[in-house]
Amino acid sequence: MIVMDQAQRLRELMAQNAYMPDEQAAAEKTTMNARIIAVASGKGGVGKSNFSINLAIQMRKLGKRVVIIDADFGLANVEILLGVAPKHTVADVLNGTVDMESALTIGPMGCMFLSGGSGMAALADLTENQLLRLTDGFVQLDSLADFILIDTRAGISNAVVNFIRAASDTIVVTTPDPTAIADAYTLIKSVKTTMPDVGILKLVVNCAVNDSEAQEVFEKLNGVSSRFLDIKLVYLGSIPFDSYLVRAVRKQKPVSIQYPFAESANRYSEICATILDMETGRKNSIQNFVMKLIGRFSS
């Protein structure tokens, strides 16, 4: 079977869809209100999923509606770290078993998340009905959330780049470990290669001994990224190595809830405040989001 160009199919299907009777209604329906943030890392083990979860919890403490999309296919880090077993994954949405809202799992403090399972690995070959279900699903998410955090898989892959392409903003998480720094740069370089207009990326340094070490990591990465890639990084802050954070992970509880007095929890709170004060990087629409998301899968 010949696989049609899904971006073109999406345009045709969206144009034909009955819930968009005229141009003005279409514009209102496809404009995204939720801010989509991709959280990425060049390698595993740097605390990316922990960052996504605790950022979401801090946003909830400020009254924001948050959905985490666990896009780390097959590893299910978000549900493990939260200690919550989901009943549904995005595969159920694509198969028409449930709609997107029903597929969401409610975590601590009302933080919602969508388990990726293996469903999103099949984005290269969606049927027309699945394509519409995915699009309608993100329309639902947009009405349910102020922020959609996409916890991408660690490393560099087409899937990771796709989510970064589709997101409004991207946060790269690294540690002071030399291999983590090198892999973070490789990720940034890969994004620049496939997305020349990427603009500004944001950086968080995890497991830093102190603020000076974290600042040094940022300056090193920002220096080479500016010089060789023409990409400016924005420093969001650092998360210190914290025994309370380790204990929270073992209890499968976010440190921001289990030990809200911990230094790591305070830093998550500060970074959250910084993000909320910043304007979104790129405006998007439901239609463009889905097209960017599936674009490289189908290629």
Image: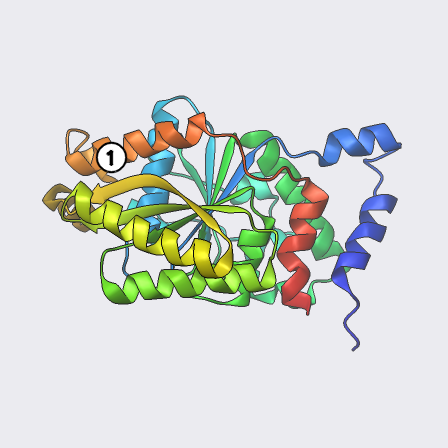
Secondary structure of the residue carrying tag 1 is helix
The answer to which of 103 and 9 lies nearer the viewer is 9
Q: In terms of image quadrants, where is residue 297?
A: bottom right
Q: Is residue 77 left or right of residue 6?
A: left
Q: Residue furthest front?
A: 227
Q: Which residue is mark 1?
A: 267
Q: Is residue 142 left or right of residue 203?
A: right
> In the displayed structure, would residue 78 be above or below residue 182?
above
Q: Percent position (x, y) of residue 107? A: 37, 38
At 49% from the left edge and 52% from the top edge, which residue is drawn?
Answer: 231
Q: Percent position (x, y) of residue 103? A: 53, 45
Q: Amino acid at mark 1?
A: Arg
At 33% from the left edge and 34% from the top edge, which residue is drawn?
Answer: 271
The answer to which of 278 and 29 lies nearer the viewer is 278
At 50% from the left edge and 59% from the top edge, which residue is drawn?
Answer: 229
Q: Residue furthest bottom?
A: 1
Q: Residue furthest top?
A: 63
In the rendered image, the quadrant that contains the N terminus is bottom right
Q: Percent position (x, y) of residue 261? A: 15, 29
Q: Percent position (x, y) of residue 35? A: 54, 35
Q: Bin the neighbour count of mark 1 within 10 Å (Cα to Cα): few under 14, some 14-19, many 20 and up.
A: some
Q: Is residue 255 left or right of residue 122?
A: left
In the rendered image, the quadrant that contains the C terminus is bottom right
At 55% from the left edge and 47% from the top edge, which residue is drawn?
Answer: 199
Residue 20 appears in the picture as rendered = yes
